[in-house]
Image: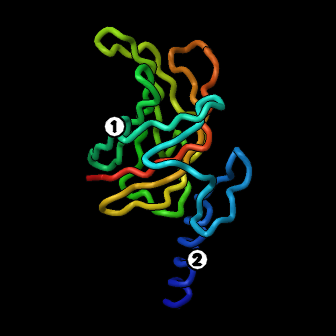
Amino acid sequence: MFKKIFSLAIMALTLFFVSCEKANINGDPNSSSSGAWWAGTAPMSLEVNGVLKVPGTDFVKYAHTPGFHNIIFFVDYTKNIAFSIPEYAIPGMVYTFPDKLTMEYNEIGNINNLILSTYKANNGGCKITINNADVIEGYFYTDLKWVGGNDYGTIEIRKGYFKVNKK
């Protein structure tokens, strides 16, 4: 009896973890042995509305808060992306926006760094490939919607990649 209950519990846990991965809206992930969806440039690269952005090391910041890894990418001098990933994120798993991850795209003014507009992720996902004591790495994609109530369009983030030192 105990073996049957234990076997059922193991099967249920396996099904739970297998079902967490979602489909990629950009097509099928590639089949490379690294588990990557696409190539990327460390510490961060992404396409914003079809335009490749590769901020340098000085434009990528990491901070840990209880329960989360927080990464800020400065896309350029007037725009940044704030990205929060659960601390427990398991390599190989895909986590979805906005239920498991958060991402904000902020447009910043020249005076006192006032945030002029904010867009938030409302779909997409992030596949974590490394999460250890020193590094967090992953791939992501999403559509960002303006949070001010009006529809000012969508910002498409595609082929996102990050590999950030935690220390």
Image height check: is 151 above or below 43?
above
Q: Quadrant of residue 109?
A: top left
- Nearer-the-camera pick, 12 or 79: 79
Q: Which mark is residue 75?
A: none
- Nearer-the-camera pick, 38 or 139: 38
Q: Quadrant of residue 134?
A: bottom left
Q: Amino acid at mark 2?
A: Met
Secondary structure under the numbered disc 2 in the rendered image:
helix
Query: Would you say residue 8 is visible in this rendering?
Result: yes
Q: Residues within 10 Å of mark 1 (few under 14, many from 20)?
A: few
Residue 140 at x, y = what percent? 55, 46
Q: List the residue tagged with mark 2.
A: 11
| Nearest to viewer (mark 2 / mark 1) | 1
Q: Residues within 10 Å of mark 2 (few under 14, many from 20)?
A: few
Image height check: is 26 above or below 28?
above
Residues tagged 2 and 1 counted as in contact (Cβ below 8 A) = no
Please identify the residue farthest to the top as the structure is shown.
Answer: 111
Q: Earlier in the sequence, mark 2 or mark 1?
A: 2
The structure residue drawn at horizontal position 28% and vertical position 12%, both measured from the top left corner, is 112
Residue 19 at x, y = what percent? 62, 61
Query: Would you say residue 96 is visible in this rendering?
Result: no
Image height check: is 123 above or below 75?
below
The structure residue drawn at horizontal position 55% and vertical position 43%, both measured from the top left corner, is 160
Q: List the residue tagged with mark 1.
A: 58
The structure residue drawn at horizontal position 28% and vertical position 46%, both measured from the top left corner, is 64
The structure residue drawn at horizontal position 66% and vertical position 32%, both measured from the top left corner, is 50
Does residue 86 appear left or right of residue 100 in this picture? left
- Nearer-the-camera pick, 92 or 123: 92
- Nearer-the-camera pick, 134 or 145: 134
